[in-house]
Image (cartoon, coloured by chain):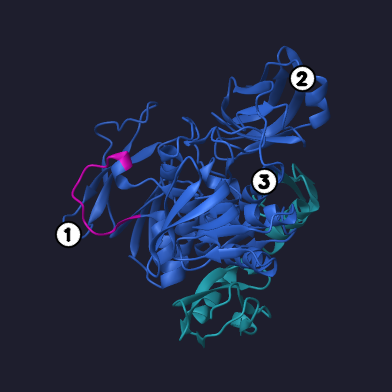
């Protein structure tokens, strides 16, 4: 039995959690105030993931950049691969919030989508 | 002169929510005045996620939160003007505005909602010795440069202050390939959210140096580095602990100040702790018909809380317009921050205007684990709430039930205090 302390990043509350590991498997999560905390703890121990947010160049728009995000969380180890691809593309205005900017970014099966509209 | 029932100063999350709420409460003649070229305020540069969990029940980025709210305002046909700066509001609620197209012009309001937000403390406010080379920025300024305008200001970065903006920008710069050498914090704890220390610093192996300060900026034309020093318990640099760290960029994330120049000139009384207006439970200031909400009232951690607070300002402003007056002459119950509590918003409850439960927002003065927050109505203990973790960086809220307040209307003072373990 091994115990690990984690701080939940699922929401701004930031619960301090204690995770009990039994043969490298999560057997107990304490200190979380909601289900998302338990799910995060499980994931963080086995396959940590993150959302990535950044910006992409826009041509002929009212602003120079459109903000983007990974539609779902991606493996933490892929963050810089995702960034590299985000920085290699350019889009033209108009862009609408929710538009897909990159499909299957860095082989993660996750799309990059716009988080604002640019006229 | 154009006339409006309600003029909202500021088109950020506070102003948008207040205007929308006023409209929902039956007022049609509303104008939002925004100085930027887009609605949404600072949310537009906060491209990270973590917004909207309470209000939209999902996790959004700042621009998404802003655009959704701006769309709500558009759908309701609420009037707004962009690129327009409010210069003053006088005691008759004449709002003086300036923009490039119309020059200087006046608008007559019946009620005014102050929603100007806050701005960053600058290097001048914290007196760092040294020349004034290029490369010293406030963190929010760099956030705008990077996220909206597409510039990276430097490649080797030190960040002073571990508030949320500093933490978020540490990650943002690391993602774009900059080397973030350290985040420096004078206090023994961070004023930012715990989650941001995990996902912005730990994920990128960025060291957080507690009880350190930037004691000098080195470089004359361009920054060459900073001198860091350890600090004592009074946050004073300890001689002999200096260490030079080379960098081309220093980001300052050293606090936010509510932007209340207009409010002060209008005669709005201020709370010295929050640097925001003193308001009752209806979020009205001492100037009748002038309300305040969001970061101009007190600096929040979460935009969701700004929205919820601003909904109340909008509703109360709408009630004021409909009744054409507000009676606050009756009994007031004073809210008093006691041991371990640095401030409370609102400042008091007017029994004559009390119409809902009252959400009291506050910050604690220190880090506490396993403490209780006690709320006393005079000598009677009304709430004894366990709080596993309290820190000054995390705003707290406790709801006072309207019925309970009315049952205890002889109360003079409601005090909030932290009972440490």
Q: Secondary structure at mark 3?
A: helix
- Coordinates of residue B160 in the picture (x, y in percent): 38, 47
Q: CA distance from mark 3 to mark 2?
A: 27 Å
Callout 2: 10 Å neighbours few (<14), some, many (20+)? some
Image height of B128 relative to A102, above or below: above
Kindly indicate whether the residue at mark 1 contacts the one at mark 3 (C-beta within 8 angstroms). Answer: no
The residue tagged 3 is B321
Q: Is residue B31 left or right of residue B217?
A: right
Residue at mark 2 shares a chain with residue at mark 1: yes
Q: Nearer the viewer, residue B212 or B139?
A: B139
The residue tagged 2 is B409
- Residue visible at 69% across and 69% down? B75
Q: Nearer the viewer, residue B264 or B179?
A: B264
- Residue visible at 52% across and 71% down? A54
Task: Say the numbered circle drawn on residue B221.
Answer: 1
Q: Colour of chain A?
A: cyan
Image height of B366 relative to B224, above or below: above
Number of marks in picture:
3
Callout 3: 10 Å neighbours few (<14), some, many (20+)? some
Q: Colour of chain B?
A: blue
Callout 2: chain: B
Callout 3: chain: B
Q: Secondary structure at mark 1?
A: loop
- Coordinates of residue B80 in the picture (x, y in percent): 56, 64
């Amino acid at each position: 039995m091994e115990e690990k302390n984690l701080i939940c990043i699922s929401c701004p509350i930031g619960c301090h959690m204690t995770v009990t590991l039994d043969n490298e498997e999560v057997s107990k999560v304490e200190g979380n105030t909601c289900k998302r905390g338990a799910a995060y703890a499980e994931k963080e121990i086995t396959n940590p993931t993150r959302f990535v947010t950044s910006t992409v160049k826009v041509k002929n728009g009212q602003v120079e950049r459109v903000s983007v995000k990974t539609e779902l969380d991606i493996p933490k180890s892929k963050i810089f691969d995702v960034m590299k691809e985000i920085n290699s593309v350019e889009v033209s205005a108009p862009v609408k919030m929710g538009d897909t900017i990159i499909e299957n970014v860095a082989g993660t099966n996750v799309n990059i989508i716009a988080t604002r509209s640019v006229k | 002169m154009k006339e409006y029932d309600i003029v909202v100063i500021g088109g950020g999350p506070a102003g948008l929510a207040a205007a929308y709420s006023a409209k929902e409460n039956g007022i049609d003649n509303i104008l939002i005045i925004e100085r930027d070229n887009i609605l949404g305020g600072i949310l537009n540069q906060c491209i990270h996620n973590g917004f909207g969990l309470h209000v939209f029940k999902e996790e959004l980025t700042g621009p998404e939160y802003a655009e959704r709210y701006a769309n709500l305002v558009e759908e309701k046909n609420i009037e707004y003007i962009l690129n327009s700066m409010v210069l003053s509001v006088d005691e008759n609620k004449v709002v003086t505005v300036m923009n490039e197209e119309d020059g200087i012009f006046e608008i007559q309001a019946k009620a005014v909602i102050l929603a100007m937000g806050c701005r960053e403390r600058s290097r001048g406010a914290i007196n760092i010795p040294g020349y004034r080379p290029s490369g010293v920025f406030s963190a929010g300024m760099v956030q705008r440069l990077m996220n909206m305008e597409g510039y990276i200001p430097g490649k080797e970065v030190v960040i002073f202050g571990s508030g949320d903006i500093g933490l978020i920008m540490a990650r943002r710069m690391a993602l774009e390939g900059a080397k973030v050498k350290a985040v420096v914090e004078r206090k023994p704890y961070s004023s930012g959210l715990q989650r941001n220390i995990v996902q912005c610093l730990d994920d990128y192996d960025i060291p957080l140096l507690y009880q350190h300060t930037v004691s000098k900026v080195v470089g004359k034309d361009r920054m060459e580095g900073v001198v860091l020093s350890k600090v004592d318990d009074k946050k004073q640099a300890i001689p002999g602990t200096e260490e030079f760290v080379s960098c081309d960029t220093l980001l300052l994330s050293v606090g936010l100040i509510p932007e209340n120049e207009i409010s002060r000139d209008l005669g709005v009384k201020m709370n010295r702790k929050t640097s925001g207006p003193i308001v009752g439970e209806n979020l009205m200031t001492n100037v009748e018909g002038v309300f305040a909400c969001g970061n101009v009232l007190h600096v929040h951690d979460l935009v969701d809380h700004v929205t919820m607070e601003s909904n109340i300002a909008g509703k109360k402003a709408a009630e004021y317009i409909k009744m054409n007056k507000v009676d606050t002459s009756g009994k007031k119950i004073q809210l008093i921050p006691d041991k371990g509590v640095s401030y409370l918003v609102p400042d008091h409850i007017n029994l004559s205007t009390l119409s809902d439960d009252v959400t009291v927002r506050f910050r604690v003065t220190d880090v506490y684990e396993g403490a209780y927050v006690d709320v006393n109505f005079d000598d009677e203990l009304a709430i004894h709430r366990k709080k596993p973790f309290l820190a000054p960086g995390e705003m707290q809220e406790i709801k006072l039930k309207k019925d309970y307040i009315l049952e205890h209307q002889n109360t003079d003072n409601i005090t909030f205090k932290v009972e440490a373990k």
